[in-house]
Amino acid sequence: MSLESIRSSVELDLAARVVDLVRQAAGPSAEAEVMVRHDAQALTRFAVSMIHQNVADAVTTVGLRLHLDGRTASGATTIVDADGLRGLVERTVAAARLSPPDGTWPGLTPPSPLHHSAGYHGSGEHSRLDFGFDEATARATPAERADRVRDFVRAAEGLETAGYCRTVYTSAAFANSAGQSAEGRTAEAAMDGIARADGADGVARLASGRLADLDGTALGARAAAKARAARNPVELTPGRYEVVLEPEAVADLLDNFSVFGFNGKAYAQKQSFAELGADQFDPSVTLIDEPLGSRDEHAAGLPFDDEGTPRESLVLVREGVTKAVAHDRTSAAEAGTVSTGHASGSSRTWGPYATHVRLEASPAPAAAPAGDPADPVAASARPLVARMERGLLITDLWYTRVLDQKTLVITGLTRNGVWLVENGEVTAAVGNMRFTQSYPQALGAGMVLGIGRESILLPDRWSGTRFAAPALHLASWNLTGNASG
């Protein structure tokens, strides 16, 4: 039995012990759910083209949510000995008795098997799912991460570089007083780096369930090519431009769609643009939340949420038609439906949102060209750029903020490379610009002129989400000012 398998059994035992302690302290009428997570993260950071920090952290957290006499309270601890668990239960029971009545309590997840997939193990009282789990990534050493940093720096050929390579391993278990019990584990590797040439930055990012998939040389060469091509930018007049967004920029669209648009609480409270069954996107657009990952990328999240609801693929948009939003048990009850497995520690407050969204790539059978390492245009975006008569190629978006949630109007800045494209060729670097754009309108009917042939898995962002994004060719993008003022 592997070390990771032993760890997972430890978490399940901890969860079951806390449920028993709740029964002893509060009686059989108390409803309790317990999520135990062991998170191990390791990060190798570099700046000025040298590694300056290697850190690792591992912590086991026990989270308890308790519903007692119509009142709800939550608590957590990282002290997992007998006294620590007993103290967690005592504090949470006391807090529940002092809390106001909770009329929105949705009840506990009933015993439910995890959704079967190629890595399913277990039956009976509890289930376990390890889909695409790579033990080599979970056990990755600082030297293995440093090798990729070295390759990135060398590939930049003298340009100043900075960024990180990280590995993450999570093992978790869930149990509740209704009899639901489950466990699972996940591992991920990611690299994000920039190269700088005369004040111009180029970026390359990639995530995978396997550290072996991260090629520091390829990423460093791409970042350097972008930096060199972004030197001496011109300043363009604000206005509406045809654009090709590379996967890094498309990830920001998916992030905001997920957190603010397909959020079950926002939908139930009519603060979302989503209208189920409506044609809200171009027919070429299909968005799917894939928490169990896919066979080609070997990257999966945990197979259950913080309420113990089994996760599975959820089609948010199919061929332009909005099909679903993400729900936990609370928002599902408010909307008159069922949970989609998107509960988190903050979902009752912030709302549940999809965390593994993929924009489906073009179904064109031809493979994307390998690309020239010195080309600032990503290989997956090159066919889209070739079709553009006049417009902009945008690598990245950042500092994006919601101006109007209902229509999802976002403002933000371009970053890490913008270029003017004329007659299918890059003709000039362009200075960064501010944009103000409704994301749903940008992907509306007739507005999507093309989608790349490959979805690229990108590292998680501030919301803890992870996206698979292709390049995207859009008819109009509203640039409202220059970053210089």
Image: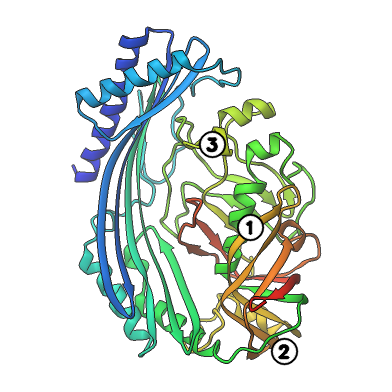
Q: Which of the image's four quarters has the N terminus?
A: top left
- Tell me what residue is drawn at x 25 percent, y 56 percent: 56
Apparent side of residue 353 relative to residue 78 in the rendered image (left or right): right
Image position, residue 92 (x, y; %): 38, 21
Image position, residue 78 (x, y; %): 28, 35
Colouring: rainbow
Identity, as a three-letter code, of the amino acid under mark 2: Glu
Q: Hey, which residue is sitting farthest front in the picture?
A: 485
- Disc assigned to residue 401: 1
Q: Which of the image's four quarters has the C terminus?
A: bottom right
Residue 181 showing in the rendered view: no
In the rendered image of this protein, does residue 374 appear above or below residue 10?
Answer: below
Q: Earlier in the sequence, mark 2 or mark 1?
A: 1
Apparent side of residue 295 relative to residue 212 in the rendered image (left or right): right
Displayed quadrant of residue 266: top right
Q: Which residue is mark 2?
A: 422
| Other-residue count near label 3 (Cα within 10 Å), few / some / many at <14 / 14–19 / ≥20 | many
Observer-nearest of 250 and 453: 250
Q: CA distance from mark 1 to mark 3?
A: 20 Å
Cβ atoms under marks 2 and 3 closer than 8 Å: no
SS for dot 3 = helix
Observer-nearest of 355 and 56: 56
| Other-residue count near label 2 (Cα within 10 Å), few / some / many at <14 / 14–19 / ≥20 | some
| Other-residue count near label 1 (Cα within 10 Å), few / some / many at <14 / 14–19 / ≥20 | some
- Tell me what residue is drawn at x 49 percent, y 47 percent: 291
SS for dot 1 = strand
Cβ atoms under marks 2 and 1 closer than 8 Å: no
In the rendered image of this protein, does residue 299 appear above or below residue 102?
Answer: below
Displayed quadrant of residue 174: top left
- Disc assigned to residue 347: 3
